Amino acid sequence: MKLILERYSHEEKQTIGNLYLTENNGSIIARWDSLELPWLDNQRNISCIPTGTYKARKHYSPKFGKCLWLQDVPNRSEILIHSGNFYSDILGCILIGKNLKDINKDSIVDVVNSRLAVRELMSSLIDVDGLMIDVNSI
């Protein structure tokens, strides 16, 4: 299995994309909407991470519960894929959800059903030895 994060909208306050879980042959197993901070030169806590390929492993966060931890991100640490709804919930991590909607009526889309999305992702990852994530923009 492999994860692919495809960013398709780069906005002032956030970056929107899709996270795909794929078989090694490229067939898609599952898809979730993703929300990250905007690209601000990989600055900690205020920027999304650079494009690239990273290792990912299951992790338990005291704050977010079960999540994925991206390893070996240049000049960054503690990059998680976890639940949340708003760009203001992000400190450089990646949120996933089941859809996009402006929940708080601030004219900025948010991810919805995020806890469900993370549960789906984590339950899909039976064997995560060698799990990789490709982060790119389209």
Image: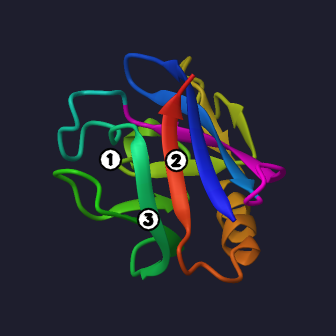
Under mark 3, the amino acid is Lys
Residue in view at x 78 percent, y 54 percent: 25
Q: Which amino acid does label 1 sit on?
A: Gly
| Residue 2: x %, y % from top left | 64, 59
Among the 4 quarters of the image, the one containing residue 51:
top left
Q: Where is residue 108 shown, x and y percent of the image? A: 54, 22
Q: Is residue 122 left or right of residue 53?
A: right
Mark found first going from the N terminus, 1 or 2? 1
Res 12 seen here: yes
Give the alpha-carbon distance from disc 2 to disc 3, as whole Å: 9 Å
> Which type of secondary structure does the marked residue at label 1 adopt?
loop
Say if the magenta span includes residue 44: no
The residue beneath circle 3 is 55
Q: Position of residue 74 (x, y in %)?
A: 22, 51
Read off the residue under disc 1.
Answer: 92
Q: What stretch is highlighted in magenta?
A: 23-37
